[in-house]
Amino acid sequence: MTDNTQLLRTSFEIQITSPPSVPIIRGYASTNLLINGSYLTLSCQSSGGYPFGKLSWYRLENERLNSIDNSSIIFPEKNLVENNISMIIKPSDNNLTFSCQVNNDYLQSIGQILQKNITLHVACKDLI
């Protein structure tokens, strides 16, 4: 009796991913008034996730998000990703909304983006 069966083999790759946290915006609270000509830095941070998330800043203009910065800095020892934008405040910035979005392989696989928005309030003659 002979055994003519062949040994079958297969291989596969497992990709382990997890979502990062919803972004947090630091540097300004929408309850405060900004002064024309002042300098403002907004910091967007997200923690966790595998792989780390990528942070992007957008400006909401005419109901459309326009990309303004997508350079993230990864701090692996803190399990944190950060993206900062800086600007000099102008009266035209009043009621301008900025959005920080985080994305990674996991979020892409489920078609989701996490974001946090902040609206600037500038002290203008009309407001005082």
Image: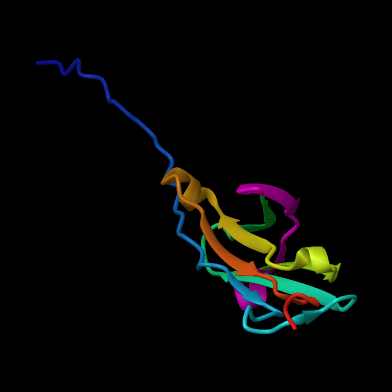
Q: In which quarter of the image is the N terminus?
A: top left
Expressed as whole percent of the image width and height from the top left, the position of residue 8 reads: 29, 25
124 lies left or right of 37? left
Image quarter for residue 46?
A: bottom right
Question: Of residues 1 and 107, which is closer to you in this image?
Answer: 107
Using residue 24 as the reference point, say whether residue 58 is left or right of it: right
Image coordinates for residue 62, horizontal then vertical, percent? 65, 48
| 112 horizontally vs 87: left or right | left
Looking at the image, the residue that sits furthest to the right is 37
Q: Looking at the figure, which quarter contains the C terminus?
A: bottom right
Its colouring scheme is: rainbow
Magenta-drawn stretch contains 107:
no
Which region is colored magenta? 62-81
Where 112 sits versus 76, above or below? Answer: above
- In the picture as drawn, the residue positioned furthest to the left comes out as 1
Which residue is painted at 69% across and 71% down in the image? 120
> For the point 70% across and 48% down, which residue is it?
66
Which residue is rendered at x = 73% and y = 72% of the image?
42
User: Is 36 displayed left or right of 117 in the figure?
Assistant: right
The percent position of residue 13, horizontal first and vertical second, equals 43, 41
Query: Quick one: 24 or 59, which is closer to the camera?
Result: 59
The answer to whether residue 76 is magenta is yes
Pinpoint residue 93: horizontal percent, then vertical percent.
Answer: 77, 65
24 versus 69 height, above or below: below
- The answer to which of 3 and 39 lies nearer the viewer is 39
How many numbered markers are drawn? Answer: 0
Kindly identify the residue that appears in the image at 71 percent across and 49 percent down.
67
